[in-house]
Amino acid sequence: MFRLSRNPRVWDFPPVEEASPEGLLAVGGDLQPERLLAAYRHGIFPWYEEDSPILWWSPDPRAVLFPRKLHVPRSLDKTLRHGHFTVTLDTCFRNVMIECAGPRPQYPEGGTWITPTMIEAYTKLHELGHAHSIESWQEEKLVGGLYGVAIGGAFFGESMFSRVTDASKVALVSLVRQLHAWGFQIFDCQQASPHVMQLGAEEIPRRAFIGHLNTALTLSNRGGRWQFDI
């Protein structure tokens, strides 16, 4: 197992082809912005539980949603058209992360992998203009959303939550439509789930994902706080 240096000036990762069959690539290091950005540029992301060292992953295959291939089921399209939710960008990033870390059906005791250290690290990325949140609201109450990291023409989705039916799906569709308008090439879902596959995500070999990622990284960064065009 490759162990990362804690030297704040060393961000090197091993080639993703050296990952285990499960996708585990490296252990250790830290969550400083430079290391996180270096990881995402190479198709790597951190995922670990609170009591374990930092684990870095690059699974094969990789779940990806190409914005141009977004599929909106008829029932969800009806929800979107009827305006049951107000959707915003970058209005309460930390709150979205905290909600994602809270109890959910698949994590009844809380999403423990979104640790306080993780929240601080990604909030710092947000303040630097690299991480973004999308929020769904009803009656001025935050009821769904997601967050992730943007580099060039790639958006790396990290986690989402929903307190009302379709709240997170509405946020995701609204984001992907805006990313498509901005020219983003890929939305990285990391691993397949019924939630994202229903919206048009697909599993592709890691080698193909890295090729799409390298192309997307040639595009200019869209930093700062985001707002919808319309």
Image (cartoon, helix red, strand yellow):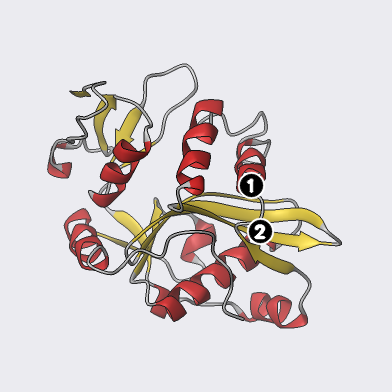
Going from N to C along the chain, the mark reached first, 2 or 1, is 1
Q: Position of residue 182 (x, y in %)?
A: 43, 77
Q: Position of residue 32 (x, y in %)?
A: 37, 33
Query: Quarter-wise, where is residue 205 in the image?
Result: bottom left
Q: Is residue 65 visible?
A: yes
> Is residue 89 toward the left or the right of residue 52 in the image?
right
C-alpha distance separating marks 2 and 1: 7 Å
Along the line of sight, the residue nearer the viewer: 60 or 97: 97
Q: Secondary structure at mark 1?
A: helix
Tag 1 residue: 96
Query: Quarter-wise, where is residue 27 in the image?
Result: top left
Report how many numbered discs are placed on residues in the image: 2
Q: Residue at x 66, y 50 (%)?
A: 92
Q: Where 106 sits versus 51, above or below?
A: below
- What crowding class fits label 2: few (fewer than 14 Cα within 10 Å), some (14-19), or many (20 or more)? many
Q: Residue at x 59, y 77 (%)?
A: 73
Along the line of sight, the residue nearer the viewer: 227 or 75: 227
**Residue type at tag 2:** Glu
**Residue type at tag 1:** Val
Q: Is residue 1 visible?
A: no
Query: Quarter-wise, where is residue 136 in the image?
Result: bottom right
Q: Residue at x 17, y 35 (%)?
A: 12
Along the line of sight, the residue nearer the viewer: 68 or 215: 215
Q: Check residue 135 in the rendering and tell me which mark sits there, or answer none.
A: 2
Q: Position of residue 132 (x, y in %)?
A: 52, 55
Q: Residue at x 56, y 77 (%)?
A: 72
